[in-house]
Amino acid sequence: MNASEDTALDHAPESELQSARRVTLVGLVLDALLGVVKVIIGFFYNSYALIADGVHSFSDVASDIMVLVLFRISREEPDEDHPYGHERFETLGAVILGSALIALAGVLAWEAVQRVMHVDLGVPGWPVLVVAAAAVLGKEWIYHYTLRVGKAIRSDLLVANAWHSRTDAFSSIVVMLGASGAMLGYPWLDAVAACGIAVIVARVGWHLAWDNVKELVDTAMPVDKQRHLREVAEATEGVRSVNAIKSRRMGSDFLLDIHLQVDPEVSVSEGHEIGVRAEHRLLEAVPDVREVTFHIDAEDEAVQQNVHAAILPSRSAVANQLEERWGDLINFHNTCPPRLHYLSDEVSVELYLESRTAVNEASRNQQCLTCQLKSRTSDLPWIGDIRIWYADEFRTGPNQN
C-alpha cells in the first residue's frame, strides 16, 4: 500500500462525517422552510391536512438534528467501554425516531377525527395545492440525495432518514388529493387526507423502529448468508466441518462467531492457523462481516455435549494419576510431558520418551509396556488410548513394546 492510499484511509471516516453532515444540513433547512410554509398556508387557507403535513416536516427537522448528533458518535473509534464500536448509537437513534413517528401519527389522526366531528370545515384555497406540489418535488429530491449518500457510506441512520423524507413527499401527495376533493365540494376529504398522512407516518415509524429493535436484540443474519458462510468455511483446507455459526448485527455490519472442527491430532498452533485462514476467507467472501471470532473444536460439538456426563480431569490431575500408577515403570524425570487428547468422554495419552533409558529396568524385562500401563489404569474410566513413542523411532511409528 502506498502513501497516498494510507492518507485516503486515514481521512475516510472524516470524509464520511462531512458527507453525512452536508446532506443532513441541506435536508434540515429544507424541512424547516417547508414546515413553516405548510403551517402558515394551511392555517390561512383552511387545510388541516397541510397543517398536519407541516408538523410532519417539523418532525423531519428533529430527526435531522438527531442524525447530526448520533452519526458523529457512531463513527467514533472503539474504546474501553465500547470495544465493538459505537454503531449501536445509530440503531438506538433509529428506534427513537421510529417511535416518535408512531406517536406523531397518533396525534395527527386524533386531531383529524376531532376536526371532522366538531369543526365546521372550510374549503381549502388554491395555494394549498401549490405548496403541496412544491413539497413533493423538494422532498423527493432530498430523498434521493440522502439515500445515495447513506448507501455510499453504509449508514442505516441516513438511509432511514432518507425514507423519512420520502414519507413527507407521500403525505404531500395525499394533501393534494384531499384538498382537490374538498374544492370539488367534499370538504371532509381534507380531514380524511390528514388521517391518511397519519397512517403513512405510522407505517414508516413502525418498520423503522421494529427493524432496528431486531438489531438491538441480536437477531442473526439472514439464513442464505449463513449458508454461504458455512460453505466458505468448510472449503478451507484443514476444516472438517462447521459445528456452529452465531451472528449479530452491529450498525450496517455483522459480527460472527464460528466453531470450526479440525483433526483432533493437529497441534494448537496448526489449529489456530487453520482458523486464521478461514477468517480471512470469510471476510473476503462477505463484505458485511466486519469481525470473525473462531473457535477450534476437536470433534463434533453435538456428539461432545451428548456424551460428556462429567467434566474430565485437568492436566495436572491426569499427570498425578499417571505418575502414581506408572512411576515404577517409567522415569518421568527423563521424559517429555505427556500429550493429552480430550475426545468424547476419554483422555488419550501419548508418551514421548527420549530413549529407552527413560523406561525403568523392571519394565524393560516385560514384553509389552503398553499393556502394563493400561493394566495399571484400568480403574480410571476416563483413560482412553495409550501410545508410546521413542525419539529414535518417530519415523517408524508408535512402539507397542
Image (cartoon, rainbow, N blue to C red):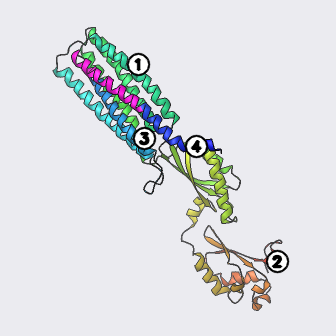
Q: Is residue 369 above or below residue 229?
A: below
**Residue in view at x 60 percent, y 70 percent:** 345
Read off the residue under disc 3.
71
Mark 2 belongs to which amino acid? Answer: Asp
Q: Secondary structure at mark 4?
A: helix
Instruction: Tell me whether circle 2 and circle 1 mark residues in contact (CB < 8 Å).
Output: no
32 inside magenta stretch: yes
Q: Is residue 107 above or below residue 284?
A: above
Instruction: Tell me whether circle 3 and circle 2 mark residues in contact (CB < 8 Å).
Output: no
Read off the residue under disc 1.
137
Q: What distance separates the C-alpha of mark 2 from that of mark 1?
A: 85 Å
Read off the residue under disc 4.
7
Q: What distance separates the C-alpha of mark 1 from that of mark 4?
A: 39 Å
Q: Position of residue 18 (x, y in %)?
A: 46, 36
Answer whether residue 209 is visible to the viewer in this image.
no
Q: Position of residue 309 (x, y in %)?
A: 54, 69
Q: Position of residue 284 (x, y in %)?
A: 63, 45
Q: Outermost residue toward the front?
A: 3
Read off the residue under disc 2.
392
Q: Position of residue 107 (x, y in %)?
A: 25, 31
Q: Which residues are magenta?
A: 24-50
Q: Outermost residue toward the top?
A: 184
Q: Secondary structure at mark 3?
A: helix
| Mark positioned earlier in the residue sequence (2 or 4) | 4
